[in-house]
Image: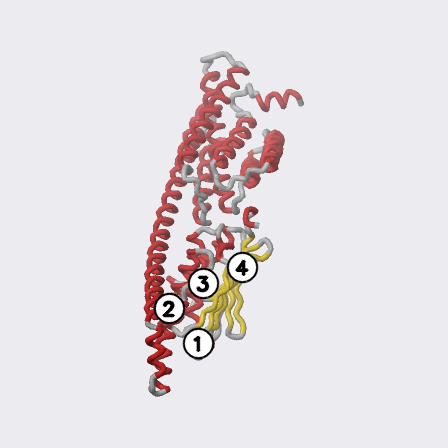
Amino acid sequence: MAQNIYNYFFEYDLSKTPGFIYVLANFLGVIIYTSFNPRRRKDIWSYVELIILELMYLIYNFLTRDISTVLFIPSIIGAFLFTTLMIYAVCDMNRRNVIYYAVRAYAFGELAGALGWQLVSYVFENRRAPYSVSVQCLITVGTLAALFVFFLMAEKYINRDQKHLHVERKEVVISVVMCVCMIAASNLSYVTASTPFSSRVPGDIYIIRTIVDIAGVSLLSAYHIILKESHEKMEMAQMAALHRMQYANYQVSRTSIDLINQKYHDLKHQIEFLKMEISEKDKIAYLNKMEKEIQQYEAENKTGNRILDTILTTKSLNCQEKNIQMTCVADGKALDFVNPMDICSIFGNALDNAITSAEKVENPERRLIHVTVSQEKSFLRIKIENSFQGVLKMKNQLPITTKEDRRYHGFGLKSMKEIAEKYKGSMTVSAKDGWFELRILIPLPESEK
């Protein structure tokens, strides 16, 4: 038993790579891709969990070091699961992000282990130096240390903006496919030597494995950079749209305030006019005209969140044009932890859908929309209700769009659902007796409770 443990850490047989190298390399990969992640947990228990998982991974790797070829692929899957659990232990992210960063960490581990043992093989195989445990340790540890520092500095540079990358399902699938192709190609010789891309010679196997792993890690790193740039461009476009909307709201507010100031100065003249001997019909018509002008000012909302105020004001004026009555009870400060782009997506999509639905109600008195934003216990609660007319069909717990060209519609609710899940919340909808309700429930961060 003692000899087996010794061989596990210091393998003299150059045709076998010590499993300990991969365990250590995967651990370093986890450190690299979580060190500069803005969602990294900083409590002591996360590090305790990480160490426990690393020890469990070490034991698992030791027990599966001499498995048969049939169990080779399941053992790789098990190793990847341990890497995923370690990422999950130290980062507060959703499953998609955890898998994405686990793929990158595992790919780094494959490269570091392969390169380290190839250099050992190169030094000892052709008798360039007599075998020595200390030299073997120096080569493997030195290789791992050099790659660790290089990739750590690269990750620090890539994440210098300290922004969380919200990975979509498609992007996770692409990264997983790239990693699977890399592992399959680099480890093909361990499964079968009867292909044009595999070998029986250890030196050739290590060269193939290292080159393929370098290519795979390079592709994953390039893909990550492309993703970040794509997300940044999208965020800039959304921010520009938000600024245009805020400026439009500023213009509406300024016009409304100027109107009220004008009406205030003219109020005494208007009172004198109404005291004159004019018909009741003319008085009512004049008062209605004044009321309509003042409603532009009443449309402004002051919730405590400027983004929400902008959206509600714009939508309120839209409702007035379509004879829709919109009421709002909102604690805007409860939204402080939500990204401004996500606030725009949630309320913009929800209110657009509500207005589209409510304006189709034939009776103007039943064209109603009500918005509620509140903080209840440890949750942010958003509820948007509106009246509708006709039959609302549902599919996968979401209403089917009623617009003619369905290719370009129906994504609003899906987007809102994804945003809710991004914050570990949920979205539900219901429709009954001509009344539609959309509810979003999101747990508050610890700092907001």
The Cα atoms of the two marked residues, 4 and 1, are separated by 28 Å
Is label 1 or label 2 in front? Answer: 2
Question: Helix, strand or loop at disc 2?
Answer: helix
Question: Helix, strand or loop at disc 4?
Answer: strand
**Position of the N terminus by quadrant:** top right
Q: How crowded is mark 4: few (under 14 residues within 10 Å), some or many (20 or more)?
A: some
The Cα atoms of the two marked residues, 1 and 3, are separated by 17 Å
Going by the numbered disc 2, the residue's amino acid type is: Gln
**How many numbered marks have been drawn onto this rendered protein structure?**
4
Question: Percent from the top left, x then y, of residue 354?
Answer: 44, 67
Q: Which mark identifies residue 374?
A: 4
Query: Depth check: 229 or 5 in front?
Result: 229
Query: Depth check: 446 or 265 in front?
Result: 265
Question: Percent from the top left, x then y, of residue 413?
Answer: 46, 61
Going by the numbered disc 3, the residue's amino acid type is: Ala
Of callouts 1 and 3, which one flags the residue occurring earlier in the amino acid sequence? 3
Question: Helix, strand or loop at disc 1?
Answer: loop
Q: Which mark identifies residue 361?
A: 1
The Cα atoms of the two marked residues, 4 and 3, are separated by 16 Å
Going by the numbered disc 4, the residue's amino acid type is: Ser
Of callouts 3 and 2, which one flags the residue occurring earlier in the amino acid sequence? 2
